Amino acid sequence: MSNVVETVKQVVEPILEEHSFYLFDVEFVKENKSWYLRVYIDKKGGITIDDCVLVSDELSEKLDAMDPDPIPQAYFLEVSSPGAERPLRNDEELQQAVGEYVHVSLYQNLNGQKTFEGTLQSVDDESLTLQNDQWGKQDTLEIPRQLIAKSRLAIQF
């Protein structure tokens, strides 16, 4: 199914560039008996429902016009934002998140905890630095990169 994903990426990129959006991810998955083509898009300031409709319409039109059909089976096309709590999957996304509130899950305990939330202060090859605001006290915490299982943006309550 990677051929479908790669084809869709090639088709959607010019559409996104035209509207100053960027591609977050594409997935083509089977859930129960149905196939889903999911395209996650974003832009500075966030994606609106109208942005998703625009990209969905243009992408659908381009895919339908291709011969041979790159996706011969029936599928549902979903275009959406990656969400307010999107994963931070690589160094570039971590660097872009500096100054943002994040959630970090660890493989093993650090200071008696496996999860931390706070404002991402810095990122380097060895560690992430969080301004941790838990329980009303502020401290800076350096988390070694090798301990990090997952990181994502988080909503601060």
Image (cartoon, rainbow, N blue to C red):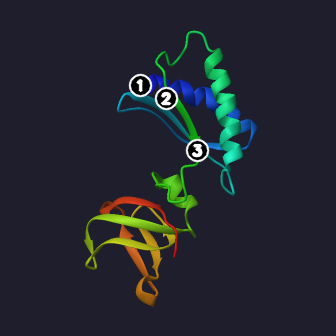
x, y percentage for residue 152? 46, 60
Tell me where residue 52 appears, x and y as whole percent.
Answer: 65, 42
Residue 138 falls left or right of residue 10: left
The extreme bottom residue here reads: 137
Q: SS for tag 1?
A: loop
Q: Nearer the viewer, residue 60 or 92?
A: 60
**Residue neighbourhood size for the residue with mark 2, other residues' Cα within 10 Å, grouped as few (<14), some (14–19), many (≥20):** some
- Judged by depth in the image, the label closer to the viewer, 3 or 2, is 3
Which x, y percent locates residue 108?
A: 24, 67
> Which residue is disc 3 drawn over?
80
Secondary structure category for the residue under label 2: helix
Q: Which mark is residue 1?
A: 1
Image height check: is 7 above or below 150? above
Residue for badge 2: 5
Residue drawn at (56%, 27%) of the image? 8
Disc 3/disc 2 C-alpha distance (Å): 16 Å
Where residue 78 sits, quadrant-wise, is top right
Tell me what residue is drawn at x 61 percent, y 21 percent.
Answer: 63
Q: Is residue 22 left or right of residue 129?
A: right
Q: Where, by quadrant of the figure, is residue 40 drawn?
A: top right
Three-letter code for the amino acid on which mark 2 is drawn: Val
Kind of residue at disc 1:
Met
Q: Which image quarter holds the N terminus? A: top left
Q: How many marks?
A: 3
Q: Nearer the viewer, mark 3 or mark 1?
A: 3
